[in-house]
Image (cartoon, grey):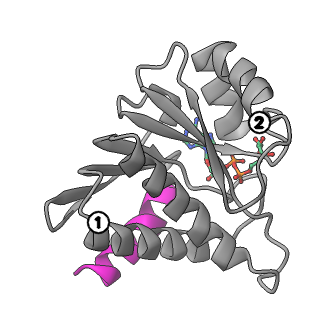
């Protein structure tokens, strides 16, 4: 599914985010930037050692939830990896929604600053971090749409869904937000 937002294209697709050809690829990282499974494992495996070397050198303190940091993309075809730290779901009363909105917004801000024309997001926090999928997709899409309407860049935003169930959740919300 794809929707036009002014001059920008917002697209939903099923796939493995480490194979994306966008200028920036977003990693679902942890606050220690220590690597992990899921998206984090797939991206570091595909990218090779460079991004991890750079996170250690540039961000020894890690990165708090709601924020993102940049490295080169190693062997990926992207120019950059944005290591984005989503919130751990704790029932919804610990600013999880604010932190999730912030992490999408930070990644889009980095994309604009680094002149990226395209960016691919995974469904941040919906795996190991336990964020309910329907809530996470709504929060993610609201923030992406708001930022694209405001800034009209990056030109192409892709939400990469690991399986059809995730695509279905995104699709239902997107159709409701932009009929
Ligand atoms: N491509 C796209 N999506 C993927 C991939 C992949 N290769 N692998 C998993 N997913 C999906 C999951 O199905 C889930 O919906 O991405 C979503 C996010 O899952 P996680 O990778 O577990 O990320 P998150 O919930 O943010 O948890 C982050 O997990 O791997 C660790 O180091 C990471 O501690 C951090 C935590």
- The answer to whether residue 133 of the structure is visible from this angle is no
Secondary element type, mark 2: loop
**Pointer 1 residue Cβ closer than 8 Å to ligand 1:** no
Looking at the image, do the residues carrying marks 1 and 2 touch, with CB atoms under 8 Å apart?
no
Query: Magenta residues, as a range?
Result: 164-179
- Where does residue 73 sit, x and y in percent of width and height? 53, 23
| Mark 1 Cα-neighbour bin, 10 Å: few <14, some 14–19, many ≥20 | some
- Where does residue 1 sit, x and y in percent of width and height? 26, 58
Outermost residue toward the bottom?
93
Q: Is residue 92 above or below residue 126?
A: below
Q: Circle 2 sits on which residue?
A: 59
Q: Name which of mark 1 and mark 2 comes first in the sequence.
A: 2
Residue depicted at 76% across the width and 49% down the height: 63
Q: Circle 1 sits on which residue?
A: 151
Give the left or right position of residue 138, taking residue 32 as reference.
left
Q: Main secondary structure of the magenta part?
A: helix
Question: Image quadrant of residue 168?
Answer: bottom left
Residue depicted at 50% across the width and 36% down the height: 17
Give the left or right position of residue 137, taking residue 57 as reference.
left
Q: How many numbered callouts?
A: 2
């Amino acid at each position: 599914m794809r929707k036009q937002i002014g001059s920008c294209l917002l697209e939903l697709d099923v796939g493995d985010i480490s194979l994306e050809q966008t200028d920036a690829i977003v990693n679902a990282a942890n606050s220690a930037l220590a690597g992990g499974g899921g998206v984090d494992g797939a991206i570091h495996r595909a990218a090779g050692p460079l991004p991890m070397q750079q996170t250690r050198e540039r961000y020894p303190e890690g990165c708090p939830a709601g924020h993102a940091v940049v490295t080169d993309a190693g062997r990926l075809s992207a120019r950059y990896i944005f290591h984005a730290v989503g919130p751990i779901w704790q029932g919804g009363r610990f600013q999880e929604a604010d932190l999730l909105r912030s992490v999408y917004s930070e990644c889009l801000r980095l994309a604009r600053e680094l002149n990226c024309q395209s960016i691919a997001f995974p469904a941040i926090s919906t795996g190991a971090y336990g964020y309910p999928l329907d809530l996470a997709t709504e929060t993610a899409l609201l923030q992406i749409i708001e930022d694209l309407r405001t800034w009209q860049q990056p030109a192409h935003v892709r939400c990469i869904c690991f399986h059809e169930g995730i695509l279905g959740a995104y699709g239902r919300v997107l159709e409701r937000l932009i009929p």
